[in-house]
Image: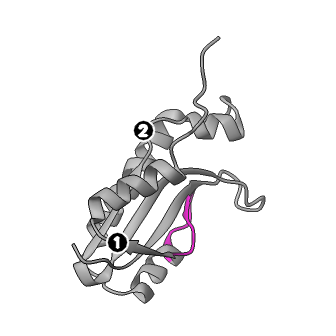
Amino acid sequence: MTPTQGYYSIIQFCPDLGRCEAANVGVLLFCPKLGYLKAMTNPSNNRIIRFFGPDSHDWAQIDVLKQGVVDRVELESHWIKSLADLRHFIALHANLFQFTSPNPARVTNPDHDLQDLFEELVCDPHPLTKA
């Protein structure tokens, strides 16, 4: 496939917006020319635990909210047709999960490129181990 312009945004868990501290939990890839918009989140909460500790979090709620982000991106994809639309979508999203500003990406195979971005930006290179 011929490379085309795309944009990615990291999905971050940010329990205290005032502190601006976050853990990467997912990624979104948008490719306007291909009509492609998809998000993935990590089913594991290990990065959140690593950054913010295992206590004081409702893990069931966090899991539901992560899936909700993916579902919302899919639901809203019909009207997100431009970078401006994506930026508007991101600006409207304000809860425990935030999207970073879109970054340019060269896209050749959207599903494969999304998986590569997910592995590079979200997957934990040092997973937690149980002692």
Rendering quarter of residue 77: bottom left
Judge depth for marks 2 and 1 and give the one in front: 1
Label 2 neighbour load within 10 Å: few <14, some 14-19, many 20+:
few
> Which quadrant of the rendered structure holds the N terminus?
bottom left
Rendering quarter of residue 117: bottom left
Left or right: where does residue 115 sit relative to residue 126?
A: left
Relative to 9, say whether 55 is above or below.
Answer: above
Is tag 2's residue or tag 1's residue first in the polypeptide sequence?
2
Q: Residue at x 38, y 67 (%)?
A: 29
Q: Amino acid at mark 2?
A: Pro
Label 1 neighbour load within 10 Å: few <14, some 14-19, many 20+:
many
Mark drawn on residue 107:
1
Residue furthest top as drawn: 131
Q: Residue at x 44, y 52 (%)?
A: 118
Count of marks placed on residues: 2
User: What x and y, as percent, mark residue 50?
Assistant: 67, 35
> Which quadrant of the rendered structure holds the C terminus?
top right
User: What x and y, as percent, mark residue 87?
Assistant: 48, 81
Q: Tell me which segment is drawn in magenta.
A: 92-102
Q: Amino acid at mark 1?
A: Val
Q: CA distance from mark 2 to mark 1?
A: 25 Å
User: What x and y, as percent, mark residue 68?
Assistant: 38, 53
User: What x and y, as percent, mark residue 75?
Assistant: 27, 66
Relative to 28, say whether 61 is above or below.
Answer: above
- Mark 2 element type: loop
Left or right: where does residue 51 sit relative to residue 40?
A: right
Residue furthest right as drawn: 19
Residue furthest front as drawn: 2
- Mark 1 element type: strand
Q: Residue at x 70, y 61 (%)?
A: 17
Mark drawn on residue 43:
2
